[in-house]
Image: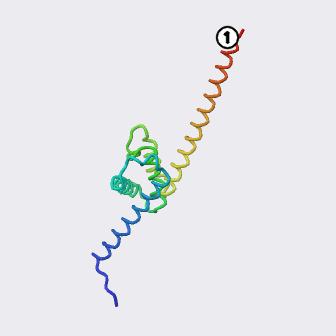
Amino acid sequence: MILIREAQIAHLAAHCRRRKIAGLCDALRGSYPERLTALSPIALYRRVRQAVARAEEYGLQDKDDWYRYLELAVLHGWDFDQQPALAWMHEYLIEERISLPSARLARLCDQRTQQIERDALNRETRARFALRRAARGRQSNDR
């Protein structure tokens, strides 16, 4: 019979956690190289470790959920959930009417995706109107 002590289990769990965080760092570097270029591997590891700890405070336990939370952190700032301008994101993450933390995060990501798409459409529309105005201005100058 094999006897595994609590200290050994804790050591193994810590090792697994370090490997998960290192894997998340690699995945983020692959997805967002231009945003993360200024961070050394050690600095990125520390940021990811801290962000994962915050994700766990929201009840997020799954590696996939951690990654989605980290994407928000990379895109909106490592402390996005504490920024007053993004308080609505924090509210989504603590929404009590949705019992599953993973579902809260999914709702937040969906909302943010819709906002990004809406913002892109608005920029495109404004650019089109600016071109029309410029064309009208040229036409009136030609007269």
- Give coordinates of residue 75: x percent, y percent: 46, 45
- What residue sits 58% from the left and 43% below the top? 114
Q: What residue occupies the far bottom of the structure in this picture?
A: 1
Depicted 55 relative to depicted 2: above or below: above
Q: Which residue is mark 1?
A: 141
Q: Is residue 63 left or right of residue 142?
A: left
- Give coordinates of residue 103: x percent, y percent: 52, 56
Q: Is the residue marked by circle 1 packed among few (<14), some (14-19), or many (20+) residues within 10 Å?
A: few
Tally the numbered discs: 1
Depicted 45 relative to depicted 142: above or below: below
Which sits in the foreground, 15 or 1? 15
Q: Amino acid at mark 1?
A: Asn
Depicted 121 relative to depicted 75: above or below: above
Residue 42 sits in quarter:
bottom left
Which sits in the foreground, 10 or 126? 126
Q: Secondary structure at mark 1?
A: helix
Q: Is residue 84 left or right of residue 7?
A: right
- Give coordinates of residue 143: x percent, y percent: 72, 8
Which sits in the foreground, 140 or 75? 140
- What residue sits 68% from the left and 17% below the top? 136
- What residue sits 48% from the left and 50% below the top? 32
In which quadrant will I find the N terminus?
bottom left
- What residue sits 63% from the left and 30% below the top? 125
